[in-house]
Image (cartoon, helix red, strand yellow):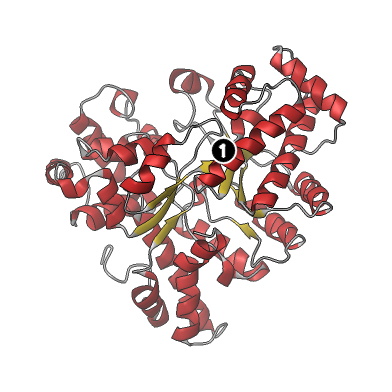
Amino acid sequence: MFLNDDFLLTTPMAKKLFHNHAKNMPIVDYHCHLSPQEILDDGNFATITEAWLGGDHYKWRLMRTNGVPERLITGDGADFDKFYAWAGTLEKALGNPLYVWAHLELKRFFGIDTVISRETAREIYDAANLLLATPEFSRRKLITHMNVKVVVTTDDPADDLHVHELLKTESAFKVLPAFRPDKTLNIDQAGYAAYIATLGTAAGVTITAFADIVEALTKRVDFFHTMGGRLSDHALDIVVYEEATPAELDTIVTTALAGGTLTANEIAQYRTALLKALMRIYSAKDWTMQYHIHALRNINDPGFARMGADTGYDAINDRNIAEPLARLFNAMESEDAVPRTIIFSLNPNDYLPLITLMACYQKDVVQKLQLGNAWWHNDTRNGMRLQLSTFAEESLLSNFVGMLTDSRSFLSYPRHEYFRRILCELIGEWVELGEVPDDEAILGRMVEDISFNNANTYFGF
């Protein structure tokens, strides 16, 4: 039966592991794109359309694929018309994780079991909207309903984090900032000089040279640390490694701040040096560094010009990463400055190179370097099984910090249930094959750790 209590749980052990161990574990969402301001304001969504389609480029891509006009995706179409178009898209999305997620969200948040279609769209739309208008469906209540204990947002180094300060006393769950220094690293992008001035003002540092940038970032990390920050996050996309002298770095920074043009080699030199400096800072603070690699972003120029970033025009890159990443980590290992690290790749072909590379720099901390969960285009049953299997076969899966949402949606938390069911399904299969003991106590502890305990311990929450 569709989404019954045992869906995806194909063995007796899988059912035991999920219902007795995974199901009720709290959630640590250690990387997401929820708005701290929206969490603080704690408003209600006007409609299920706003809650579901607002900012969700996963859904936008599918709707475009189904021929839905842009006015019914991101445009000025009426809310119900957009919902109706989304329902029509879901009719054709069987086998896509969004089909499962959408129905799980209806079931877990709203108690609605109706299969989504154009025929049922009005019924679902009206029923969901009635609930969304009630106090129990405010943004914060949606999060607490899913037993979320920690939410880690994505924040710019220049942010004053005033909203996070207010949330310390306003929220029933922890809302912590994560340090996202992409604008400082992206020296080749428009607006770099203006951003560096903003960063300098926030840090109280006049920036004219490379060392000034490092000083400013150090001060901002110190500030984030006082606000509970313990993680950084980088949309690294591609990995480069080129050494540079201090004089070369100062020339590169001076040129960029003056609006000059840099060579590809100079850009690589700057990014390498800044990543190394940040790794030293993170290591000294015992922070966790996250790299999100191999997104091929904004590859539809007209679409990007019309709508900007994170609107559904991104794909998977297939560049080589092992050698430059190894050079970076080797250089920092020589300084004993490799921080706790989680590396996510959008290209699953990278899983083996990444996890074998990280094994070369493990020491002192339990699973100090981790292969991040299946991310973005890999948030599928097969994608999650591949990531879990690779982790298990090449490292110690029992140490894995588990699932995150990486989402802009307040309704995305049932994805943790989806992940946990797949984890229990996989372990149950190992039992049936005789690969692991048929021992619920041992395996249940493993599932509880991956679901919650490991992340809570690893990040020091």
Q: Secondary structure at mark 1?
A: loop
Q: Position of residue 29 (x, y in %)?
A: 44, 53
Task: Judge the density around disc 1: few (<14), some (14-19), many (≥20) Cα neighbours within 10 Å.
Answer: many
Instruction: Tell me, yes or no, if residue 104 can be seen here.
Output: no
Q: Residue at x 64, y 18 (%)?
A: 193
Residue nearest the viewer, comparing 316 with 189? 189
Residue annotated with mark 1: 180
Instruction: Tell me, yes or no, if residue 421 can be seen here.
Output: yes
Q: Position of residue 163 (x, y in %)?
A: 39, 37
Residue nearest the viewer, comparing 364 with 15? 364
Q: Is residue 233 above or below residue 15?
A: above
Q: Is residue 277 above or below residue 420?
A: above
Q: Quadrant of residue 41?
A: top left
Q: Is residue 239 left or right of residue 123?
A: right
Query: Tag 1: residue type?
Result: Arg
Q: Residue at x 76, y 23 (%)?
A: 209
Q: Dividing the image into 4 quarters, which one contains the N terminus?
A: bottom left
